[in-house]
Amino acid sequence: MKLSVVVPAYNEEKLIGNCLRSILNQTIDHKEYEIIFVDNNSTDNTSRIAKNLGVTPVMYKDKKSAIWAKQFGAKRAKGEIIVITDADAIVSKDWLENILRLFEDKKLMCVGGTVLATGNNKFSIGVLKFFDYFARGFQVVGVPFIWGTNMAVRRSAFAKIGGFNTNLRTSDDWEFVMRIQKEFGLRSALYTNKLKVKASPRKQDNMGQLLPYVAIGIINFLSIFVLRKSYTFGKQTVVR
């Protein structure tokens, strides 16, 4: 098996169906990948919807936290490459095919890419498009803004750096990429628009949460990618 797709979820009955259908409807054969769907203490129909689509949930009840659920799922992976997305995301049909092509470059340990907004809200669409151009620009100077919504990493590299830093409450994805680069070099991580995912714009739609989210993101960018420290600020914003 080449790929293990990890999807952590908490009370996502409204969106999980579209997410899993997009993963099941890929251009590569189903034998090439497994789906590790981690139900992190959901109290709604999230797991039932997954089962109806033929995806068996893995229950993780120890802690209600996306980072712990991701870590739990990734450690169960059997594939050579661990792929991660969120339960509110819809991945492109050739997503996994393009991930496999990128990893033909043996120097690459971690890849990620474009996250755009679902729906018709022009503000949310604009915010995420701007971030995509911003991220592609920084990739030129060796700074890969890879989100956990659209991320893939070699299982061997994941194991070598110890996976995600579960002590963090925000920006664990960026901090993870920084440690990959420290271990394997600047060119070991890549942000590219060849990998496309659409996600719910819940954070961008709520202006009261968007501004603190952006401010914390800027601070964490400076901490991680400028100071190269495993220290982040703020707390995870949960929007449903």
Image (spheres, rainbow, N blue to C red):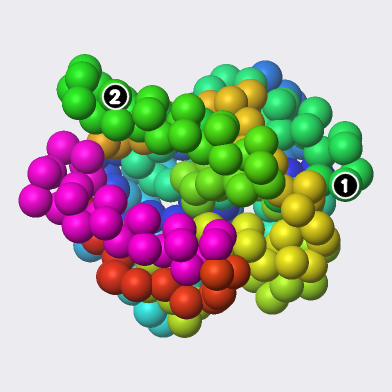
- Judging depth in this view, the residue of 14 and 50 nearest the camera is 14
Residue 86, relative to residue 225: is it above or below?
above
In this picture, residue 110 sits left or right of residue 166: right
Residue that mark 2 sits on: 126
- Judging depth in this view, the residue of 77 and 151 nearest the camera is 151
Residue that mark 1 sits on: 107
Given the image, on which type of amino acid does mark 1 rest? Lys
- Judging depth in this view, the residue of 234 and 219 nearest the camera is 219
Residue 234: tell me if it is visible.
yes
Q: Quadrant of the N terminus?
A: top right
Position in image of residue 191 (x %, y %): 62, 38
* Residue name at image x 38 percent, y 26 percent: 129
Of the numbered discs 2 and 1, the one sitting upstream in the chain is 1
Residue 71, relative to residue 56: is it above or below?
below
Position in image of residue 135 (x %, y %): 51, 37
How far is the residue under mark 2 from the one under mark 1? 33 Å
* Residue name at image x 26 percent, y 56 percent: 215
Dot 2 and dot 1 residues touching (CB under 8 Å) = no
* Residue name at image x 67 percent, y 67 percent: 179
Given the image, on which type of amino acid does mark 2 rest? Gly
Look at the magenta stretch and give its main secondary structure.
Answer: helix
- Judging depth in this view, the residue of 197 and 234 nearest the camera is 234
Position in image of residue 139 (x %, y %): 63, 39
Count how many numbered circles sit on residues in the image.
2
Report if residue 110 lies within the magenta region: no
* Residue name at image x 55 percent, y 69 percent: 227
- In magenta, the rendered stretch is 202-226
Secondary element at tag 1:
loop
In this picture, residue 174 sits left or right of residue 31: left
Secondary element at tag 2:
helix
Query: Dot 2: within a 10 Å radius of its alpha carbon, few (fewer than 14), some, or many (20 or more) residues?
Result: some
